[in-house]
Image (cartoon, helix red, strand yellow):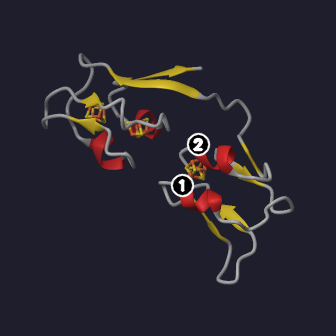
Amino acid sequence: MAFQLNAEKCVGCGACAYVCLYNAAGAANDVASVYTIDEKKCVECGQCSRICPNSAITAPDGWRKIKKVTIIAEKCKGCTLCRRICAADAPFGEVKQPFTIDQNKCFQCGACAQKCRFDAIQVEYV
Ligand code: SF4
Ligand code: SF4
Ligand code: SF4
């Protein structure tokens, strides 16, 4: 799933591309007056939807806003995957030791929880 951009409502301002830290939102072509969202790159953080001035971007069915993301120390293997994929550089720790998420950096996108192979990342929803 991914956030959906309604081309008929898009005014081409580029705000979505500006805020998307995963490079999922971008111009449809070189002379773009319309933007698109790459479903393969979108992590469903919702930043683009919040900033779009014309409400052109909507959440997929069943999407829920995340309140907090934390790592369960007992499950974490310190594999570093979350740190490598996080666009905010929020997870930190020593390799093969339990990691922690810097809550001052985390913007609750949920990408790390989707990727952790050890089910070590807990997501709380609003
Ligand atoms: S929901 Fe997040 S990752 Fe997806 S396009 Fe919007 S800003 Fe980018
Ligand atoms: S991806 Fe999962 S197991 Fe790996 S360091 Fe992050 S929380 Fe720990
Ligand atoms: S939920 Fe937080 S720690 Fe996890 S990838 Fe997103 S910004 Fe990084």
Q: Residue at x 63, y 57 (%)?
A: 16
Quarter of the figure with residue 91? top left
Which numbered disc flags the more N-terminal residue, 2 or 1?
1
Going by the image, does 68 lie left or right of 36? left
Query: Which amino acid, mark 2?
Result: Glu
Going by the image, does 81 lie left or right of 77? right
Asked whether residue 84 appears in the rendered view, the answer is yes
Quarter of the figure with residue 77? top left
Helix, strand or loop under label 1: loop
Going by the image, does 75 lie left or right of 43? left
Q: Residue at x 45, y 40 (%)?
A: 111
Query: Which amino acid, mark 1?
Result: Cys
Residue 83 x, y percent position in the rendering: 29, 43
Q: Within 8 Å of ligand 1, the CB of disc 1?
A: yes
Residue at the top extreme of this rendering: 74
Residue 39 x, y percent position in the rendering: 61, 55
Q: Residues within 10 Å of mark 1 (few under 14, many from 20)?
A: some
Q: Are marks 2 and 1 in contact (CB under 8 Å)?
A: no
Q: Which residue is mark 2?
A: 44
Q: Residue at x 61, y 42 (%)?
A: 46
Asked whether residue 38 appears in the rendered view, the answer is no
Tell me the tag on residue 20. 1
Quarter of the figure with residue 100? top left
Between 64 and 9, the residue placed more toward the observer is 9
Helix, strand or loop under label 2: loop
Residue 84 x, y percent position in the rendering: 30, 48
Q: Within 8 Å of ligand 1, the CB of disc 2?
A: yes
Residue 9 x, y percent position in the rendering: 84, 58
Tell me the tag on residue 78. none
Question: How far apart, in angstroms, are the residues tagged by discs 2 and 1?
Answer: 10 Å
